[in-house]
Image (cartoon, rainbow, N blue to C red):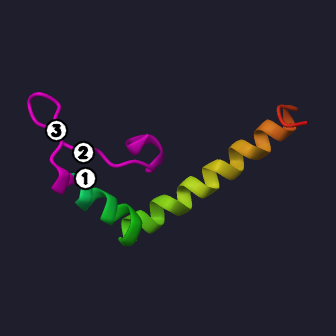
Amino acid sequence: MEEEMGVGMEMKSGAMGEVDAGKVERVVRMVMEGEKGKDMRERVARCGEMIRVAMEEEGVFG
């Protein structure tokens, strides 16, 4: 999703798949406070709206 839609951020992990708490904090702050995060949140909102409209048209919600 990160590359295709621009709505995710990769978190590099260690050899055993572990992720350091500091890395998690930095990524969360980027998404919540940064300009890249603002753009990402806007894309997510647009994608959500497109999905909602498509599901309504197909009768999923109706």
Spatial separation of the CA atoms under disc 3 and disc 2:
6 Å
Q: Are marks 2 and 1 in contact (CB under 8 Å)?
A: yes
Q: Is residue 21 left or right of residue 8?
A: left
User: x, y (%) of residue 45?
Assistant: 61, 57
**Which one is earlier in the sequence, the residue at label 1 or at label 3?**
3
Disc 1: which residue: 24
Judge left or right: residue 24 versus residue 8: left
Q: Quadrant of residue 2?
A: top left
- Residue 3's place in the image compared with 23, above or below, is above
Tag shown at residue 11: 2
Q: Quadrant of the N terminus?
A: top left
At 46% from the left edge and 68% from the top edge, which residue is drawn? 38
Name the quadrant of the C terminus.
top right
Quadrant location of residue 26?
A: bottom left
For the magenta stretch, what is the residue range?
1-23
C-alpha span from label 1 to label 3: 10 Å
CB within 8 Å, label 3 to label 2: yes
- Reading the image, the residue beneath label 3 is 13
Element under label 3? loop
The residue shown at (77%, 39%) is 54
Please state which of residues 2 and 60 is positioned toward the viewer in this rendering.
Answer: 60
**SS for tag 2?**
loop
Which is more foreground, mark 1 or mark 3? Answer: 1
**Between 14 and 55, which is closer to the camera in this rendering?**
14
Q: Secondary structure at mark 1?
A: helix
Residue 7 on the magenta segment: yes
